[in-house]
Amino acid sequence: MGLFKFCKANNVHITAYGPRGCTPIPALIGRQGPGPLQDSKIGKIAQKYSRTPAQVILCFMISRGVSVIPKSNNLQRIAENYDCLFELGTEDYQIIDALMGPNGERGVRNLETRDYLGFDNFNEEVEEP
């Protein structure tokens, strides 16, 4: 069972800080390829609704019951973040779900702890201090 399903089943609310990817992520996790805002599938969905990729990501997460805390210092993007409630089609949810993986395992991790804690505190198979 993935973390999202576990939290839903146990009435634990999820809040996503920096749900659009945040700038430092590639440096923190050594990501290869596009971030969520540059993903071509997200881009096509955004074009379909005349929205930005950020608005699509925020809409998707809010509609799934996740609170979002997007970070921006740009006034235009802050205003766009508030205009993220619209109806996505079933096929769009399926496309975004497929990007994330069945249990969210391909989602972008905003915090990489290995470098400063010395271990991966997200690895549930290994009990660390």
Image (spheres, rainbow, N blue to C red):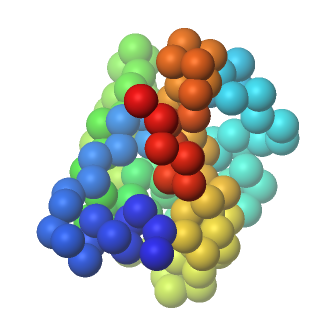
Q: Position of residue 128 (x, y in %)?
A: 48, 35
Q: Position of residue 15 (x, y in %)?
A: 28, 47
Q: Does residue 117 appear in the picture of this structure?
A: yes
Q: Position of residue 94 (x, y in %)?
A: 59, 80
Q: Residue at x 76, y 34 (%)?
A: 31
Outermost residue to the left: 11
Query: Of 18 and 38, which appears nearest the observer?
Result: 18
Q: Residue at x 49, y 82 (%)?
A: 89
Q: Residue at x 57, y 34 (%)?
A: 120
Q: Residue at x 47, y 68 (%)?
A: 2
- Give the quadrant of the C terminus: top left
Question: From the viewer's perspective, is 127 left or right of 5?
Answer: right
Query: Of 4 and 116, which appears nearest the observer?
Result: 116
Above or below residue 94? Residue 106 is above
Q: Does residue 22 appear in the picture of this structure?
A: no
Question: From the viewer's perspective, is 110 left or right of 70?
Answer: right
Q: Position of residue 12 (x, y in %)?
A: 19, 61
Write down the quadrant of residue 81 in the picture.
top left
Outermost residue to the bottom: 90
Query: Of 127 and 41, which appears nearest the observer?
Result: 127
Above or below residue 12? Residue 58 is above
